[in-house]
Image: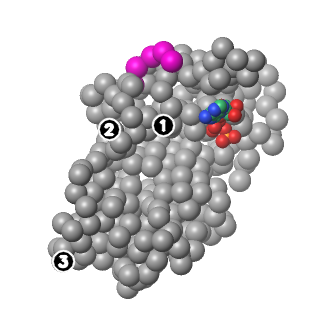
Amino acid sequence: MIAVDAVQVVFNAGTPLQNEVLRGLSLDIAEGQFVTVIGSNGAGKSTLLNVLAGEVQPSRGRVRIGGRDVTGQAPHQRAALVGRVFQDPLAGTCGELTIEENLALAAARGTRRGFGRALDTARRTRFREALAALGLGLEHRLHDRIGLLSGGQRQAVSLLMATLQPLQILLLDEHTAALDPQTAALVLRLSCELIAEHRLTALMVTHSMRQALAVGDRTVMLHRGDVVFDVAGVERARLDVPDLLALFERARGETLDQDDLLLA
Ligand SMILES: Nc1ncnc2c1ncn2[C@@H]1O[C@H](COP(=O)(O)OP(=O)(O)OP(=O)(O)O)[C@@H](O)[C@H]1O
């Protein structure tokens, strides 16, 4: 269970650039739920993910992950609970290290172990099997530097790295946005498969309303630092993109600039 309770985030507090980015936002996510998050530019979506990962500390409110109060904990203190894949394929992996070295680091996430233990034969076999399951032929490239992979291959490995260890929440931050449509579809499918296989609790930020409705079990829209609507189940299944747009406009009492929410 994930609980974000009345979280406020203010950047540059007390300066002329003060910006209240999350305004007492509350969100409870049940174990195993896959939530898609949409919202206009600057709505606070990445900040919400940063709050869950511990990269940004709220000035007010509490955060619980898996029943544990993690408010105030640094990212490394909750590393064993949180997996994350970023928009930039270069962000989640180390390009200078090989695929297996990256996987070994991911397997050691949240522990004090180094490569020594991490790269024994059993682990290599496990990595090979996990890579084979992606269906991209990467199991034959364990010793290649990650920097040699395409953006899509790298995102696929990032997904694997994020889910290699048991975790409480997977954060996907527009992780298909930098990919061509075909590769984006592949990475999205792999994401859904990994989430289903490991029964993960997941939060996926996307600018595509179509994508937001097509995957997951619940959709949350943020606007100016708060949840403007939250839809799941039958009600969600009946929605299409124009409905989502209309809901947004009704919730905020304003007309949305369609360019703000790419309908890709
Ligand atoms: N570390 C920071 N310091 C100062 N301001 C920040 C910081 N991080 C984010 N912001 C500001 O907070 C606001 C919300 O940013 P955030 O990245 O959470 O929005 P978003 O909904 O993810 O937007 P986008 O869809 O454009 O990525 C923006 O105005 C942004 O400039």
Q: Considering only order in the chain, which callout, 2 or 1, is on the residue closer to the N terminus?
A: 1
Q: Which residues are magenta?
A: 59-63
Frontmost residue, 57 versus 207:
57
Tell whether 33 sits left or right of 88: left
Q: Measure how far apart labels 3 and 2 are at the Cα level.
A: 29 Å
Q: Is residue 190 above or below residue 170?
A: below
Which residue corresponds to the image point at 36% horizontal and 42% vertical from the top-left? 76
Helix, strand or loop at mark 1: loop
Q: Determine if residue 198 is in view.
A: no
Q: Position of residue 179 (x, y in %)?
A: 63, 64
Q: Considering only order in the chain, which callout, 1 or 3, is on the residue closer to the N terminus?
A: 1
Q: Are marks 1 and 2 in contact (CB under 8 Å)?
A: no
Q: Position of residue 87 (x, y in %)?
A: 59, 54
Q: Residues within 10 Å of mark 1 (few under 14, many from 20)?
A: some
Instruction: Name the quadrant containing residue 157.
Output: bottom left
Q: Which residue is mark 1?
A: 55
